[in-house]
Image (spheres, rainbow, N blue to C red):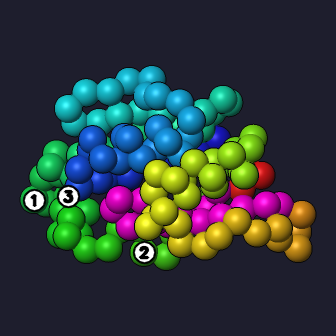
Amino acid sequence: MFKIELFVHKLSASVVFYRCLLGKGCTAHDEKSALFKAEGSGSLLLTDEAVLHADHYFASMAESRKGKGVELILPVDDVEMVYNKFKNIYPDHIESKIIARPWGKLDFRVIDPDGYYVRVTS
């Protein structure tokens, strides 16, 4: 349903991070952007913030903390497997450890290389 675009400081670092998180590669990739498509209608587009023109809404925020007040929610098939992978590869990016929530979901939270907050959930 939603298509999300994140403007990122270093595209290559973000692509590696989201490949690890999503467990799959990009469906399209060039020096300016990378597209991850989910089953169904969702997608994640990573775009290098260097493409932003000076008058673009986000241009003045390039050096600020990204995604303030936004939580991206990523459902995955095997939360524990993704969590264990992140513990080994990106331990400093884990914001909260894996936990069973009262609403019946298992989740953990990570901070991506640009500061976007992502909940990984069952």
Query: Overall secondary structure of the magenta stretch?
Result: strand
Residue located beneath label 2 in the image: 68
Give above or below for 14 relative to 38.
Answer: below
Disc on the earlier residue, 2 or 3: 3
Question: How far apart, in angstroms, are the residues tagged by discs 1 and 3?
Answer: 6 Å
- Mark 1 touching mark 3, by CB under 8 A? yes
Q: Over which residues does the magenta segment extend?
A: 105-120
Q: What SS does tag 1 mark?
A: loop
**Is residue 72 at least partly visible in the picture?**
no
User: Could you tell me which residue is drawn at 10 percent across and 59 percent down?
Assistant: 54
Identity of the amino acid at label 3? His
User: Could you tell me which residue is drawn at 32 percent across and 73 percent down?
Assistant: 65
Asked if the magenta segment contains residue 112, the reply would be yes
Residue located beneath label 3 in the image: 56
Camera-side residue: 86 or 22? Answer: 86
User: Could you tell me which residue is drawn at 19 percent across and 70 percent down?
Assistant: 63
Decide: few, some or many residues near mark 1? Use Cα within 10 Å; few <14, some 14-19, many ≥20: few
Q: Position of residue 20 (x, y in %)?
A: 50, 42
